[in-house]
Image (cartoon, grey):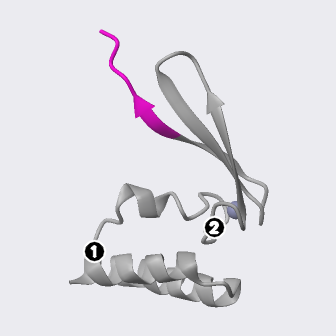
């Protein structure tokens, strides 16, 4: 139940054009997760800046750059446009062995 609400809120926040409203929805989702001790899905956690904790929307409040680092690992670099923090998100790790 709580998880469903979180997903609905985050999906709504991503679609929301008003960034103030979007971050309000995103913060509410986070509060619900904490209150119910629900672990946020990985995809959703990526949408919160690790440094300033703001909700970041790729293409709007975050710059996403696809980089190909060593061989099998494909990663994107996400730059938070609010605080400038950059972090990597690993998309796929092919097992070579
Ligand atoms: Zn940030």
Mark 1–mark 2 CB contact (< 8 Å): no
Query: SS at mark 1?
Result: loop
| CB of mark 2 near ligand 1 (< 8 Å) | yes
- In the rendered structure, the answer to whether residue 7 lies left or right of residue 62 reads left
Report the magenta residues as a range.
Answer: 90-97
User: Which x, y percent locates residue 94?
Assistant: 37, 23
| In magenta segment, residue 96 | yes
Residue 63 vs residue 26, the one in the foreground:
63
Residue 91: numbered disc: none
The answer to whether residue 80 is visible is yes
Quadrant housing the N terminus: bottom left
**Foreground disc of the pair 1, 2:** 2
Please provide percent x and percent y for residue 59.
69, 61
Residue at the (59%, 84%) spot, across then down: 16
Confirm or reject: label 1 Cβ below 8 Å from ligand 1. no
Q: Which quarter holds ligand 1? A: bottom right
Q: Quadrant of the C terminus?
A: top left
> What is the C-alpha distance between the residues marked 1 and 2?
22 Å
**Residue 27 position in % (x across, y down):** 52, 82
The quarter of the displayed image where residue 67 is located:
top right
Element carrying mark 2 = loop
Q: Position of residue 44 (x, y in %)?
A: 44, 64
Please report whichever mark, 1 or 2, sits nearer to the chain's N-terminal start.
1
Mark sitting on residue 37: 1
**Rendered residue at 54%/63% (across/down):** 47
Q: Is residue 36 visible?
A: no
Question: Which residue lies most toward the top here?
Answer: 97
Q: Dot 2 corresponds to which residue?
A: 56
Query: Exactly how many numbered labels are in the figure?
Result: 2
Examine the rendered structure and indicate whether residue 84 appears above or below residue 21: above
Residue 62 higher or lower than 75, as above or below: below
């Amino acid at each position: 139940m709580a998880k469903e609400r979180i997903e609905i809120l985050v999906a709504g926040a991503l679609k929301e054009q008003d960034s103030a409203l979007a971050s309000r929805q995103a913060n509410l989702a986070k509060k619900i997760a904490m209150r119910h001790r629900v672990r946020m899905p990985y995809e959703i956690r990526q949408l919160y800046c690790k440094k300033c904790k703001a909700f970041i929307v790729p293409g709007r409040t975050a710059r996403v750059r696809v980089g190909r680092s060593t061989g099998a690992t494909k990663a994107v670099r996400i730059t938070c446009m609010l605080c400038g923090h950059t972090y990597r998100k690993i998309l796929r790790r092919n097992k070579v062995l």
